[in-house]
Image (cartoon, grey):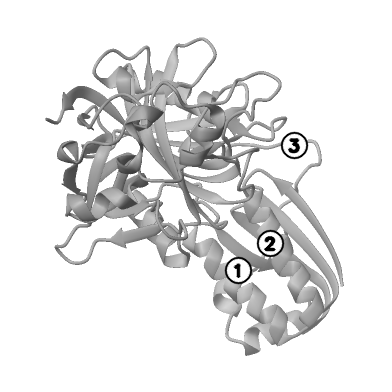
Amino acid sequence: MRLSTAHDGPVAVVRLSGRLDGESARHLSDTIEDLLREGARSIEIDMSGVEYLSSAGIRVLAHKSEDLAALRGSLHVVTPSPEARATIEAAGLSAGLVREDTPTRISSGSGRFTHWGLPTIEARYGSYEVSRYSDDGVVCRLYGPAQSLLRGPADPTACRAVAFGARSFGIGIGAIGTRVEDATPRLGELIAAEGVVTYLPTEGTRTPDYMLSYANLPPKAVLASGLVWEGLFSDLMRFSTQPDSDQVPLTELAEVCVEMSGTEAVAIALVAEMKSLVGASLRRSPALIPANLAGDADVAQIREWLSFTPEPAYAGSTALIVGVVARRPTAPLAGHLRPLDRDGVLFGHLHAAVFPYLPVPQRTVMLPALIGRLFEESAPRDVLHLVYDDRGADAVGETGLLRGVCWMARITSVESVP
């Protein structure tokens, strides 16, 4: 079989000729997966030159059509040959799969274009489209000490059990459960969103654990420190890379979020296909840190308690990222945020739950449904506190994104939980 593709933004045309048998069906499946990774959401398959179509090819067409429909996209066969049409009709797929017109003509010089018809914000590395739904804001609640927990052992009396139901979000150092004495030996990086909590335990094999909501029973977690909010998001932002860029830096996306929110601090939750992630996670619970570690620890000692990504990691994954970003924050919020740029203007605290690759819809989609799909398809591979590393020649850099959807909520007030 001969296969060629033309791709422009969300539209792609795949041209096939020859025999679409078991071996070539695998190539077609891989090609469609690659197009999804590149942002295609409307795929046309020109089968005018197909001489033979086996059940293996039918299976790929049926499954990929379902995948695109789940992403609110589409896959259609256009101009099928008589041989291909007969097999598609015999399989009962003709009504939903075959489209009776010619393939879209894609000019080699047309470049990428936007899909949603909304005003587009063009930044240096990314293209952003923002839909505003309300002017409401949220209250951000702060738990635990503002300083790093590596400055001394976590105080069990300062830990608090928090329920994370629908429309609840949070990040921090914590563990699933309600009993402080049971949770403190397991404290690790935690992220909560829309009735789901996942964290990286600091005991055993360091395999992420997670808990979903069941009926009227929301998951609960013990927080040693963190940020929590609940409510509706006011803005939805779709983003993707510029044609000449291979990634959207997390700092640029954070800056756009703050700018578009019209306020100095914004809570965000996003699902994105990733270029890479740069972050850190606790190796041991901060409840076990010796009191003499603070102030006297060298790099080797710190690495006993913290794990860093030595280079950008998890290329080709999909991540759920939750957190708070702010421009020149003031107390008490400032103590819970870390610098996101060299100028000391942009600050943030962001955690990521990392999953195997799953294409992200580029049209309007409900966040609970998207998060639910992530956890239905697979378990999280890691949970990271995202960091910005600008140490010079040895710097790892920062997290880079390819495309995704981001929900934003203006932070109208901040409360410290006693």
User: Quarter of the image containing the C terminus?
Assistant: top left
Left or right: 87 with respect to 121? Answer: right
Disc 3, SS: loop
Q: Position of residue 60 (x, y in %)?
A: 66, 75
Looking at numbered disc 3 in the image, what kind of residue is underneath it? Ser
- Circles 1 and 3: CB atoms closer than 8 Å: no
* Residue assigned mark 2: 32
User: Quarter of the image containing the N terminus?
Assistant: bottom right
Looking at numbered disc 2 in the image, what kind of residue is underneath it? Ile
- Circles 3 and 2: CB atoms closer than 8 Å: no
**Marks 3 and 2, the one that precedes in the sequence:** 2
Q: Position of residue 248 (x, y in %)?
A: 59, 32
Give the foreground label among 1 and 3: 1
* Residue assigned mark 3: 110
Dot 2 crowding, Cα within 10 Å, few <14, some 14–19, many 20+: many
Q: Residue furthest bottom?
A: 90
Left or right: 367 with respect to 298? Answer: left
Q: Nearer the viewer, residue 150 or 280?
A: 150
> Above or below — where is 193 with respect to 135?
below
* Residue assigned mark 1: 64
Q: Position of residue 306 (x, y in %)?
A: 48, 39
Disc 1, SS: helix
Q: Between marks 3 and 2, how big is the CA–CA gap?
A: 21 Å
Figure quadrant of residue 160: top left
Looking at numbered disc 1 in the image, what kind of residue is underneath it? Lys
Residue 115 in view in this figure: no
